[in-house]
Image (cartoon, rainbow, N blue to C red):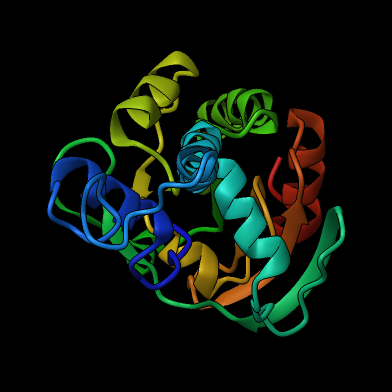
């Protein structure tokens, strides 16, 4: 997810060339090759450092990398939004969302959900708090039936893991697949999970909750915003 540093020739690269190409500069026996004791050890140190960095990068989860980008990178928040935990009422235009469906083919458009209040939840299978929250959202969505439209946006995630996640928590509402976190960036999401509440037209954001929702809190918000219970 994060743009990597520009590619350049490193000491480690020269070291590898010298091992695979005996005629390369710096190779054993090549003109100018270091012969002093300890020279080989000094050349091996950059290789060890590079390997350690690569291993650390692999170990980091997608969610951790994305969170780092949102925390440290320049990231505009939507007008009126606040980067604090909890719920806040808002009133600003909603940005269009059109993403591939996680399950099956085709696209999911936010505009296609217009006609009833919309709950749009950003989550990932790598997000710990998303587990209990997803179970709560799925339960409330089943209980409310057609009174409210729910939309999940799987963010910066792997498709197979995400599909297993929604199956585990019995999510029946539409799930959009957003591996590049495009929608999260558009909505100024500071971390996961975050839930936006939209008007029935789908054109206005009327509320935002940063952090995991419980079923009870979600029901209170739905009643406050839409008088739905």
The spot of residue 118 in percent (x, y) is 53, 57
Q: Residue at the location (55% across, 37% down)?
A: 56
Please tell me whether residue 95 is drawn above or below residue 38 in the rendered image. below
Q: Can residue 167 be seen in this view?
A: yes
Q: In this view, does 181 lie to the left or right of 88?
A: left
Q: Residue at the location (81% across, 31% down)?
A: 216
* Count of numbered labels shown in the rendering: 0
Q: In this view, does 53 lie to the left or right of 86?
A: left
Q: Which of 24 and 189 is in front in this view?
A: 24
Q: Residue at the location (72% across, 61% down)?
A: 208
Q: Nearer the viewer, residue 184 or 20?
A: 20
Q: Quadrant of the C terminus?
A: top right
Q: Nearer the viewer, residue 164 or 126?
A: 126
Q: Residue 112 sits in which quadrant? A: bottom left
The spot of residue 46 in percent (x, y) is 51, 48
Q: Nearer the viewer, residue 169 or 117?
A: 169
Q: Is residue 153 visible?
A: no
Please tell me whether residue 100 is drawn above or below residue 218 in the rendered image. below
Q: Residue at the location (66% across, 79% down)?
A: 78
The spot of residue 15 in percent (x, y) is 33, 49
The spot of residue 167 in percent (x, y) is 38, 18
Q: In which quarter of the image is the N terminus?
A: bottom left
């Amino acid at each position: 997810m994060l743009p990597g540093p520009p590619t350049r020739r490193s000491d480690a690269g020269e070291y590898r060339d010298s091992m695979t190409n005996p005629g390369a500069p710096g190779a054993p026996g090549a003109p100018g090759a270091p012969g002093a004791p300890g020279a080989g050890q000094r050349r091996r140190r950059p290789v060890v450092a590079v390997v350690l960095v690569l291993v650390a990068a692999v170990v980091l989860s997608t969610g951790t990398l994305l969170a780092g980008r949102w925390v440290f990178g320049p990231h505009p928040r939507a007008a009126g939004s606040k980067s604090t935990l909890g719920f806040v009422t808002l009133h600003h235009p909603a940005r269009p969302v059109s993403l591939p469906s996680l399950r099956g083919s085709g696209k999911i458009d936010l505009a296609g959900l217009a006609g009833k209040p919309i709950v749009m939840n950003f989550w990932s299978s790598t997000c710990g708090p998303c587990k209990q929250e997803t179970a709560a959202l799925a339960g409330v969505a089943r209980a409310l039936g057609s009174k409210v439209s729910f939309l999940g946006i799987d963010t910066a995630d792997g498709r197979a893991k995400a599909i297993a996640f929604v199956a585990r928590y019995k999510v029946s509402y539409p799930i959009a697949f957003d591996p590049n976190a495009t929608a999260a960036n558009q909505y100024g999401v500071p971390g996961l999970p975050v839930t936006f509440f939209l008007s029935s037209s789908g054109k206005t954001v009327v509320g935002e909750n940063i952090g995991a929702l419980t079923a009870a809190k979600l029901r209170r918000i739905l009643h406050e915003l839409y008088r739905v219970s």
